[in-house]
Image (cartoon, rainbow, N blue to C red):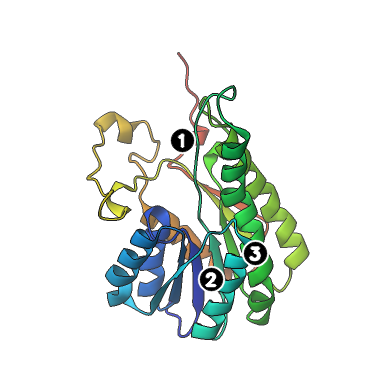
Amino acid sequence: MKNNNRTVIITGGGQGIGKGTAMRLLMEGFNVVIAEIDREAGFEAEKELSQYGRVKFIPCDVSNEEEVKAMVSETVKCFGGIDVLINNAAISVNKPITEISLEEWNSVLGVNLTGVFLCSKYCAPHLKERKGSIINMASTRAFMSEANTEAYSASKGGIFALTHALAISLGPDIRVNCISPGWIEVGEWKKESKKQVPVLSEMDHKQHPAGRVGRPEDIASMILFLIDSKNSFITGANFVVDGGMTRKMIYV
């Protein structure tokens, strides 16, 4: 699916799933804006990925309304419009509920959930012009948990609900879907100062019904499927991409 002059914004696109998705979409012919708060990661990604196509790093804290408005405005100025928004930026603070502060809780919700709201709000008029698409990155943590993940899990559950609300409000001009990744290994997709070769055991792979731990390209492939105009009947849906882990019953 090669595309000429189609533009996608990827929040948190400087590392991890966002960076892997940016590379894949560039290779498919999209212009890519990396909206990233980490300047080191953003500039590195822009330089590294420029060999694949037109990519621009725009510094942005997605929890800050003015920065989001500026990022959207600069994107339109540079590329003429917006076809796809991928709300991928996320942080986590995993502490016992008796220890996590209100400030930390609000910080996680601000980036992970309010960021989706703000980016969707200010991209919506531009997406409507091009019959565009929004992809929100939820998580299997929206539906199952480990201990001490209240803030992160709540934010991802909120994204799941916000997705179907946006699909109803913005349709039929804009389709809105979300993806819930499971274990996606991103060690090699971090910025240079944090990059690490993953150490995965045979059991890490075998515990997945699909037989392996996930990779960023697994999520990028689902994104490409969802934004393809041939799949225009899909909106308001959540797609779990986790190698089957949430379907596996575990007995002790």
Compared across the picture, whether 249 is left or right of 161 comes to left
Mark carried by residue 102: none
From where the camera sits, is residue 16 visible?
Answer: yes
Q: Which residue is mark 2?
A: 228
Question: Could you say where residue 82 lies in the image, as x and y percent from the top left?
Answer: 57, 77
Q: Secondary structure at mark 1?
A: helix
* Residue 28 image point, x, y percent: 39, 74
Q: Nearer the observer, disc 2 or disc 3? A: 3
The residue at the point 41 percent across, 58 percent down is 38
Estimate the spatial distance between the alpha carbons at disc 2 and disc 1, rounded to whole Å.
27 Å
Q: Nearer the viewer, mark 3 or mark 1?
A: 3
Cβ atoms under marks 2 and 3 closer than 8 Å = no
Residue 62: image quadrant is bottom right
Relative side of 160 to 55, left or right: right
Disc 3 from disc 1: Cα separation: 30 Å
Query: Quick one: 177 or 87, which is closer to the camera?
Result: 87
Taking depth in this image into account, of 73 and 144 the one nearest to the observer is 73
SS at mark 2 in the image: loop
Picture residue at 63% right of the left edge, 69% below the top: 232
Q: Quickly name the residue at label 3.
A: 120
Q: Quadrant of the N terminus?
A: bottom left
Q: Quadrant of residue 184?
A: top left
- The residue at 63%/35% (across/down) is 102
Amino acid on which disc 2 is placed: Asp
Residue 245, disc: 1
Name the N-terminal-most of marks 2 and 1. 2
Q: Of the residues under marks 3 and 1, which one precedes in the sequence?
A: 3
* Amino acid on which the number 3 mark rests in the picture: Ser
Rendered-image quadrant of the C terminus: top left
